[in-house]
Amino acid sequence: MANKKNKKKVQQNSESAKTAAASSSKVEASKAVSKKDAAPAKKAKAKKKNEKPGFFARIKNYFRSVKSEMKRVVWPSKKELINYSVTVCVSLIVVGVLIALLDMLIGEGLVLFSSLRG
């Protein structure tokens, strides 16, 4: 398990080094461009970043993320599902019986306390 994490860290570090090298070359190239040419491009990029995706695009992104999350779910086996279901049903019955007993006990206590029986 630890080896997998270390491998991922090494891969991420190498990828970040590649992106840093690429960004430094972009910075050098952008310095060559005059300020007058760069101003309209920045405005166009700023508009696109601030724009909200359309309604259908958001729905598409939502279902895409739901699909990816559903792939990560660990589903129980049939045997586990049956065991869990039986456990829930037994728990419901036990709690229901306890509540009924407490209801009867409290009801009888109130009847005895108030002497309402004839």
Image (spheres, rainbow, N blue to C red):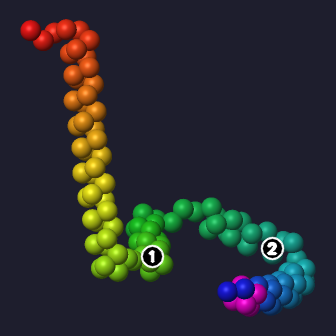
Magenta span includes 6: yes
Q: Is residue 31 above or below residue 106?
A: below
Is 85 placed above or below 4 here? above
Does the image show residue 66?
yes
- 51 sits left or right of 54 in the view: right
Residue at x 35% of width, y 75% of height? 80
Q: Position of residue 66 (x, y in %)?
A: 43, 72
Residue designated by label 2? 38
In the image: residue 23, left or right of residue 115: right
Q: Note whether 93 is above or below 76 in the view shown.
A: above
- As for residue 4 lying within the magenta part, the answer is yes
Q: Nearer the viewer, mark 2 or mark 1?
A: 1
In what quadrant of the picture does the N terminus appear?
bottom right
The image shows residue 34 at horizontal and vertical percentages of 88, 77
> Do the CB atoms of the residues marked 2 and 1 lie less than 8 Å apart?
no
Query: CA gap, disc 2 to disc 1?
Result: 47 Å
Q: Position of residue 105 (x, y in %)?
A: 25, 28
Location of residue 117 by image quarter: top left
Amino acid at dot 1? Val
Q: Residue 73: which disc?
A: 1
Residue at 27 percent of width and 57 percent of height: 90
Between 62 and 73, the residue placed more toward the observer is: 73
Stretch in magenta: 3-8
Nearest the viewer among 26 and 71 is 71
Which residue type does callout 2 highlight?
Ala
Residue visible at 16% across and 9% down in the picture: 116
- Residue 36: image x %, image y %? 84, 71
Packing grade of label 2 (10 A; few <14, some 14-19, many >=20) is: few
Helix, strand or loop at mark 2? helix
- Residue at 44% of width from left, 68% of height from top? 62
Query: What is the quadrant of residue 16 in the picture?
Result: bottom right
* Mark 1 Cα-neighbour bin, 10 Å: few <14, some 14–19, many ≥20: few
